[in-house]
């Protein structure tokens, strides 16, 4: 029995450093996966190019192809048209062909894809940009803060939820 206890204790002592090392590795942040390379025909624009275009608002149209929740969480450019990539084909007749177009997404992936699609359809696309890339280069992104609920709407919601409580 004494040999079994000693062997078990020795096994625990030898296994402890391995277990603690595994815990330490689990606590470390894992590095973010590398960004996908930009492989689109449309040029990926930088901050200086975007700033020059923003100085001519009458000539350019920014089309942000992200979801509304991404725009409100991350931010976007001061003026833009929001059309998600999968809806772009449906709204082509409403996009002015005389304007220079810049497409926007978080890191220019979806923006590049949508820019290539628009260029193939005859639009004057000047480039694509990632709003987070622009901000990383020192550009100023507009943050959109959702409005607070109106007091009367909040009161109605509270009253409505009171009337539907489960009685049991």
Image: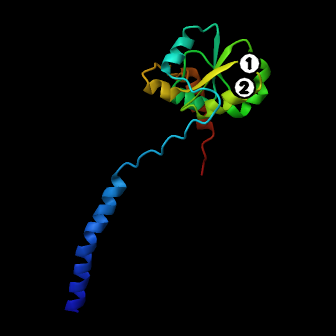
Q: Which mark is nearer the camera, 1 or 2?
A: 2
Relative vertical location of residue 93 with respect to residue 19 in this rendering, above or below? above
Please give the name of the residue rendered at 71% of the width and 34% of the height, measured from the top-left corner. Answer: 86
Lateral position of residue 82 relative to residue 44, left or right: right
Q: Position of residue 117 (x, y in %)?
A: 72, 30
Q: Position of residue 147 (x, y in %)?
A: 54, 21
Q: Which corner quadrant holds the N terminus?
A: bottom left
Camera sees residue 84: no
* Marks 1,2: beta carbons within 8 A: yes
Q: Which mark is residue 7?
A: none
Question: What crowding class fits label 1: few (fewer than 14 Cα within 10 Å), some (14-19), or many (20 or more)?
Answer: some
Relative vertical location of residue 164 with respect to residue 66 in this rendering, above or below? below
Please give the name of the residue rendered at 40% of the width and 49% of the height, measured from the top-left corner. Answer: 30
Lateral position of residue 71 relative to residue 84, left or right: left
Lateral position of residue 6 relative to residue 86, left or right: left
Q: Position of residue 41 (x, y in %)?
A: 65, 30
Q: Nearer the viewer, residue 147 or 86?
A: 86
Camera sees residue 147: yes
Residue under label 1:
95
Please give the name of the residue rendered at 49% of the width and 29% of the height, measured from the top-left corner. Answer: 132
Q: Position of residue 3 (x, y in %)?
A: 21, 90
Q: CA distance from mark 1 to mark 2?
A: 10 Å
Lateral position of residue 138 relative to residue 60, left or right: left
Q: Quadrant of residue 123?
A: top right
Q: Which mark is residue 118?
A: 2
Q: Quadrant of residue 44?
A: top right
Q: Nearer the viewer, residue 49 or 55?
A: 49
Going from N to C along the chain, the mark reached first, 1 or 2, is 1
Q: Nearer the viewer, residue 20 or 125?
A: 125
């Amino acid at each position: 029995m004494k040999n079994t206890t000693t062997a078990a204790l020795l096994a625990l002592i030898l296994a402890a450093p391995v277990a603690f090392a595994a815990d330490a590795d689990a606590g470390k942040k894992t590095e973010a996966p590398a960004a996908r390379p930009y492989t689109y025909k449309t040029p990926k624009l930088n901050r200086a190019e975007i700033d020059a275009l923003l100085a001519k608002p009458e000539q350019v149209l920014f089309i942000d192809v992200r979801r509304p929740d991404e725009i409100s969480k991350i931010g976007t450019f001061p003026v833009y048209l929001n059309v998600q990539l999968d809806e772009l084909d449906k709204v082509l007749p409403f996009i002015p062909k005389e304007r220079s177009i810049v497409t926007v997404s978080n890191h220019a992936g979806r923006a590049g894809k949508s820019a290539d699609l628009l260029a193939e359809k005859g639009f004057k696309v000047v480039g694509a940009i990632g709003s987070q890339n622009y901000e990383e280069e020192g550009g100023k992104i507009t943050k959109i803060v959702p409005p607070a609920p109106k007091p009367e709407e909040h009161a109605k919601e509270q009253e409505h939820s009171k009337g539907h409580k489960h009685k049991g």
